[in-house]
Structure formats: C-alpha cells, structure tokens
Image (cartoon, helix red, strand yellow):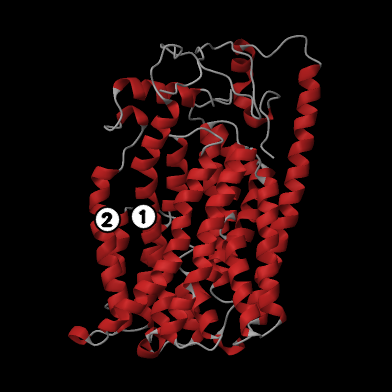
Amino acid sequence: MEKHEAFHVDEKVTPVGEHVEYVVSSSASLEASSINEKALIRKTDYRLVPWLALLYLLSFLDRSNIGNANLFGLSKHLKLTQNEYSTCLAVLPSMHLSTIMIAWGVVMIGMGFVKNFEGLLVARIFLGITEAGLFPGVSFYLTQWYRRYEINFRIALFFSAATAAGAFGGLLARLINEMDGVNGFHGWQWIFILEGIMTVVVACASFWMLHDYPDTAKFLNAEEKEFMRARLALDNDGCSQAFKYKFVKDAFLDWKVWVFACIFQGALMPVYCFSLFAPTLTANLGYTAAKAQLMSTPPYVLAAITTVAAGYMSDRLQKRGIVAMIFATIGAIGFALLLATKIPGVNYVGMHLAAAGVYPLIPVVVSWGSNNCGGSLKKGVATAIIVSVGNAGGVISSFIYPAIEKPRYFKGHGINMAYCIFTLVASGFMTWYLNNENKKKDARNAARTHPWTAEEKLEHEDRGDDVDWFRYVI
C-alpha cells in the first residue's frame, strides 16, 4: 500500500511552499500512520463532491430554467412584456440571503402555478432568497475538507454541474414540454413543477448525505479523522483563526478583495447571460424552439470539460492568474465571433468558445480571492463580498439581450466581450502586483537574521496577510 510521506507535527517546522505552510501542534505523529493519503482523499471525493455537484446542478437548473420555459410560451401565456420578463430574470441574482434547499424547491413548485407577472416576480424573489447562499456556502464547506492547492479542482468539479445544468436542462425541458396540456397545465408549468419536486426530494436526502466536518464524518474511522485534521493543519497560514470584528473590517477595507470581486463580476455576468439566453441565441440560428433546446447542449458539454480542466491545471501549477487570463481570452474571442457576423456556423462556434471560456473562470477567481486572505474569518467575509458583487452582474445580464435587438444582439455580445477583456486585464494586473509584493516579502525575510519563530508569529497573527511569512497566490 502506498503511504503518505512521513512528517512529524511540530510547531517549529520551517515554513515551505508557495504559501508559507507551517504545522501547528498536534497530539499525534503521522510518521507511523498506515493511512494511504491518496485513497483517503479519493474516498472523501466520492462521498462529498458528487452530491455537492448534484445540489448545484439543481440550483442552477432551477434558476435558469425560466429561459427554457420562456421558449415554450411562458411570456405568451402570462402576457409578459420584454421589460417584465427581464425584471423577473434580474431579481434572482440580486438577493444574497441564504436559506435551506428545500425552501427553494417549494418555491420552484409554486412557480408552476403563477398566473401573471406579479406572481412570477414574487416567486423569483423568493427563489433568489433561498438559493443565494449555496455557492459561497459550498465553497467554504470544501475548505474544511481539502488543502489550499486541492480546493480549486473540487470547486471546479461541483461548479461544472452548472454547465451540466445547462446541457441537461435543455434536454429535460424538451422532454417535459411533451406534457403540455396534461391536467390542464402548459408545458412550461410542468417544467417548474417537476424540477421543483426533484429538488425537494434531493433536499430531504441531503440531511443524511452531507457531513459537517471530518471530525464528525461517519464514513471516516478514528484514525482517518485524525489524519485529515493533521493534514489540514499543514495549511494553517500563521494568521489568527479567532472571531474578531477586526477581521471583518479588514476584509471590507482591503482593496484587493474588491478588485477580486470586480473580476468575479467580470466572469459571472457572461455566465448568467449564457445560462439565461443560450436557448434563445441558438433559436436565432434558425432552429425551432424544440431543436434549439437540443442544439444548446454541446456548448455546455465543452464548458464542463474546460471547467474541470482549468481547475486541475490551476491546482497543479499552483497558479490562478495565468489560468484566468487564458480562459478570459477564449471567452472574449467567442463573444467577438458572435458580434462580428451573422453566419450561423460561425455564431455556433462562438457560442462554444464563449461557454468554454467564461465558465472555468468562476472557480478560479473564487479560489484566487480566498487564497489571498489571511485567517479564516477574513477569508469567509471576503468570499461573501466577492460572490455578492459578482452576483450583481446577474442583474445586468437580464437586460442586455432585449428581444428587439434580435438576431444580432450587438449590445449583449459587446458588453460580454468587454467584461471578458476586463477580467483579462484585471487578472494580469493582480498577477503582477501580487508577484511584486511576494518579492518584497522575500527580500525582507532574507534580511532577517533567523526564520520566523512560533512566538513571533503569535505576536503578529492579527495582521492577516500583511505579515511577511504569508505569500500571495499569483
């Protein structure tokens, strides 16, 4: 059996790695452990990631299926104007209160019974309230199980469910629409009702499927729990893990957090646009509504592949910025093709490139911003800020593809291309800045007469990522 490389838990071990990783005190030495680390991580992956991906698939499916429902007569039957439909799209991303999954499933079922604009608007508001906390919550949840350069790949795996939702959602909507007229309900109503019921069923099962922390996980034995605790301790960044309002203030006053938040909006707004309008854009290529649902699937499949590949690449290289720049460029090229011509084949290629470029940016940017905050409280608050500002892009996305501009949608494609270019430029700037800051820290550390001791770190632990032993991820 392949064993984990021996190491001893000792508070005074010399810092190593991209981030300065030091080992906190522990009651157990792992030198003689019989645990196979790779097998244990695979075991954890199998128990957590697929279920989290399913939750996010249902979340994204429920928030974006309004685009599928609209193709099958939602606006027509509810007599919605273009502005009213756009408003119902916009209210979801602007809400940032989290509640339980079962609540949004009930709300989704209720959407199948709305009779007018007001009913749909209220339902979308409550859907936003109940879903808003899922992505930041799961992102933070994964940090309780995986180390720093394991986390982005896992976030990419569960976020790839969003692309699966796009592919699966179109196919599912196409099938459900065949129920048009059953029990007097339109096909679009059945889309909301059946997908809502599916969400409630999965939500009930989640009470047994999810585990809070390694220490309380029933699928780990005592030795595995201790092993997980000790390996996670290796990533302690030497910053205070205490709950102090100072760290909340630090997160809000750190300009880097706000830059990452803007980068995240630059990435997320095009994702919202794609998820909401992909069926419409495909229909503009000349397909019927039913075939447009099917033809919108391949771009999502490609996006799922590139999302996972980008997550793996980012963790493997231990770099975030260069990966963000690569995929922002791909996304910009995709929207440029959509903007430049009305040739159906070229537009379809542009849709593939746009999806393949923008979806991978989400886990990369969230991981990047989180990695560069010292201390767990600042990291948690910063992640919430980043996701909240990013979600504001969803409001914009709902109004930049008005039906009056079909089939070219110059404004929508142009704004999305500009967002991708902004993400590229801002990521390049942060890569340069953080690398320069690391060099300054290296110089100051080299000028010291001795390595940082545990006592010195304790004295400065409230300074967060400003301390010289904390290295920024570039």
Q: Which mark is residue 202?
A: 2
Residue 471 in the image: state x and y as whole percent: 68, 30
Q: Is residue 47 left or right of residue 443?
A: left
Q: Earlier in the sequence, mark 2 or mark 1?
A: 1
Residue 374 in the image: state x and y as whole percent: 60, 32
Q: Which mark is residue 54?
A: 1
Quadrant of res 358: bottom right
Disc 2 residue crowd, few under 14, some 14–19, many 20+, Cα 10 Å: some
Amino acid type shown at disc 1: Leu
In space, the residues marked 2 and 1 are separated at their CA atoms by 8 Å
Would you place residue 28 above or below residue 4 in this image? Answer: above
User: Residue at coordinates 78% horizontally, 43% vertically from top-left?
Assistant: 432
Disc 1 residue crowd, few under 14, some 14–19, many 20+, Cα 10 Å: some
Count of marks, rendered view: 2
Residue at the extreme front of the image, as rendered: 1
Q: Is residue 195 left or right of residue 431?
A: left
User: Residue at coordinates 48% horizontally, 30% vertically from top-left?
Assistant: 243
Quadrant of res 68: bottom left
Would you place residue 444 above or below residue 410 in this image? Answer: above
Q: Is residue 369 visible?
A: no
Residue 326 in the image: state x and y as whole percent: 69, 55
User: Residue at coordinates 66% horizontally, 37% vertically from top-left?
Assistant: 473
From the image, which quarter does the C terminus lie in? top right
Circles 2, 1 touching at the beta carbon (< 8 Å): yes
Would you place residue 185 above or below residue 314 in this image? Answer: below
Would you place residue 224 above or below residue 350 in this image? Answer: above
Frontmost residue, 357 versus 409: 357
